[in-house]
Amino acid sequence: MKNTSSAETCDVVYVHKENVAAAKKSIHKLETLQGLSETFKVLGDVTRLKICLALAKQELCVCDIAALLSLSESAVSHQLRIMKAMRLVKHRKEGKMAYYMLDDKHIEDLIRLGVRHVSEY
Amino acid sequence: MKNTSSAETCDVVYVHKENVAAAKKSIHKLETLQGLSETFKVLGDVTRLKICLALAKQELCVCDIAALLSLSESAVSHQLRIMKAMRLVKHRKEGKMAYYMLDDKHIEDLIRLGVRHVSEY
DNA sequence: GAAATAGTTGAACAATTGCTCAATTGTTTT
DNA sequence: AAAACAATTGAGCAATTGTTCAACTATTTC
């Protein structure tokens, strides 16, 4: 009796055809995946996570964030630019100050969910 | 009239004391943040995202994943090791094959939430 | 208008990342 | 026991990342 879903050599054909076919369907199109991975990448850095958490409840100026995290304003500014490009934060200018705040409520949810994963072992 | 929450020089004191104090409270302890950032970092790569999605509905062997993603088995194995260390996947051995599956239902939720963030603009 | 201040930007650097290649392990088949 | 095969592992490499430094812009204050 021959099982079509296995017993094939690995080099040429999938070992488990049906499963691979099913798996193929659940993979989003590359464009979505690219954006998705970049969003996660932004959250995949302790400094940027801290910035997100700091901005969760109120806006802060670059200067505040820099002092809070013991970083240079330059470093903070660089990170904020990345986060703005990925639409995690937005900012408003008031005089020479720039006030940043979270741009998307999903971010808080993502972090909350992430915390649950981390703390559940 | 002096406003205690601003009008300080940036080098020495926070510009907005109260806000910074509030922000400080919402930042988790470093240990949690480290784990959190590493979890997001794992999801911050297209290949690993694909693997997660592929394993969302059924288990697959290394060979299947490699063929599905047009990658070497070595590359896949390397990534799976990282993902296992971060408890995104687990595996069972059956003969010479290794079957991998998602280890945590949070991962699917995280990805789903991420997709929503990406597609909502 | 000059000095001071908040923020931005680009170049440069060390550190990290994802992959390839080659060697190796462990299991099955002959 | 030898050959074949799935998977793992370590070294090495190009590419990317996070920060610092220095130069710069823009706004406020003197």
Image: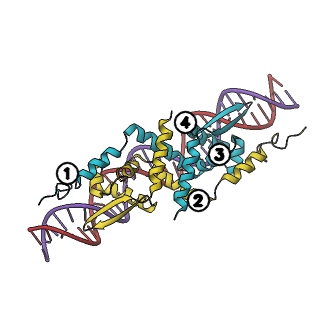
Chain colours: A cyan, B yellow, C red, D purple
Q: For numbered disc 2, what is the local secondary structure?
A: helix
Most foreground residue, A50 or B111: B111
* Mark 4 and mark 3 on one chain: yes
Q: Which residue is drawn at 47% across and 50% down?
A: B109
B55 in relation to A63, above or below: below
Spatial distance from mark 2 to mark 1, Cα to Cα? 43 Å
Mark 4 and mark 2: Cα distance apart in space: 26 Å
Question: Residue at the spot x=54%, y=36% of the render?
Answer: A85
- For residue A85, the mark is 4
Chain of the residue where label 1 is placed in the rendered structure: A
Please, what is the three-letter code of the amino acid marked with disc 1? Answer: Val
Q: Which amino acid does label 3 sit on?
A: Ala
Please name the residue shown 33% across and 66% down the image: B92
> Are discs 2 and 1 located on one and the same chain?
no
Chain of residue at mark 3: A
Q: Residue D6 placed where, x, y %?
A: 25, 61
Q: Which mark is residue B32?
A: 2
